Amino acid sequence: MPFYSHTVSYEADYRVDKGAGRILVGLGKWHGTVAKVLVNGKSAGIIGSQPYEIDISALVQPGVNHVGVVVFGSLKNLLGPHHGKIARGLVSPQSFRSAPAQPPAGASYDIESYGLMDEFQVVATAGR
């Protein structure tokens, strides 16, 4: 779905022992604008900058916990620019003026990959 610009969700269940200490959700390799973290259906917050982790200790309970990560894309894939002289991260009317007279084959479009490229991690650390 190369022009998809919305969200991609990932979910898993994790067992947490009583007194496990501080619990973090960490993102490995991922690409998106921000990632929302949910624990047992409640928002734990947003990850948008390094170190790409969030403390979920206040929301976890002893036993099995359902953890979700929702990665948000952007309008880049939907609206472009898709070809020409592209400066990633910067879009202006000028970005569309250097497009070729005829659209090239779809395989040569500049498209962003969004989502988790590695599984998210739930890690217990010592202390609270």
Image (spheres, helix red, strand yellow):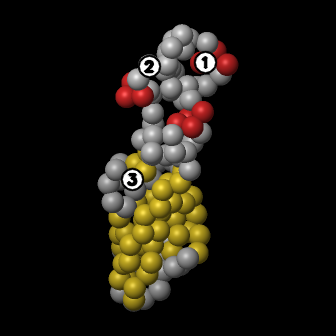
The residue carrying pointer 2 sits among few (fewer than 14), some (14 to 19) or many (20 or more) residues within 10 Å by Cα, namely: few
The residue carrying pointer 3 sits among few (fewer than 14), some (14 to 19) or many (20 or more) residues within 10 Å by Cα, namely: many
Residue type (three-letter) at the residue carrying disc 2: Pro
Q: Residue at x 38, y 77 (%)?
A: 13
Whether residue 78 appears in this view of the structure is: yes
Foreground tag (3 vs 2): 2
What is the CA distance from the residue labelled 3 to the residue labelled 1?
Answer: 29 Å
Quadrant showing the N terminus: top left
Residue that label 3 marks:
116
Please tell me whether residue 127 is drawn above or below residue 100 in the rendered image.
Answer: below
Q: Kindly state the secondary structure of the residue where label 3 is placed.
A: strand
Residue that label 2 marks:
104
Q: Which of 121 and 124 is in front in this view?
A: 121
Q: Kindly state the secondary structure of the residue where label 1 is placed.
A: helix
Badge 1 or badge 2: first in the primary sequence: 1
Residue that label 1 marks:
96
Q: Where is residue 62 in the image (x, y as percent from the top left)?
A: 42, 88
Q: Where is residue 10 in the image (x, y as percent from the top left)?
A: 43, 64
What is the CA distance from the residue labelled 1 to the residue labelled 2?
Answer: 14 Å
Q: Where is residue 98 in the image (x, y as percent from the top left)?
A: 56, 11
| Circles 3, 2 touching at the beta carbon (< 8 Å) | no
Q: Which residue is drawn at 51% across and 79% down?
A: 40
Foreground tag (1 vs 2): 2
Q: Where is residue 107 in the image (x, y as percent from the top left)?
A: 37, 28
Residue type (three-letter) at the residue carrying disc 3: Leu
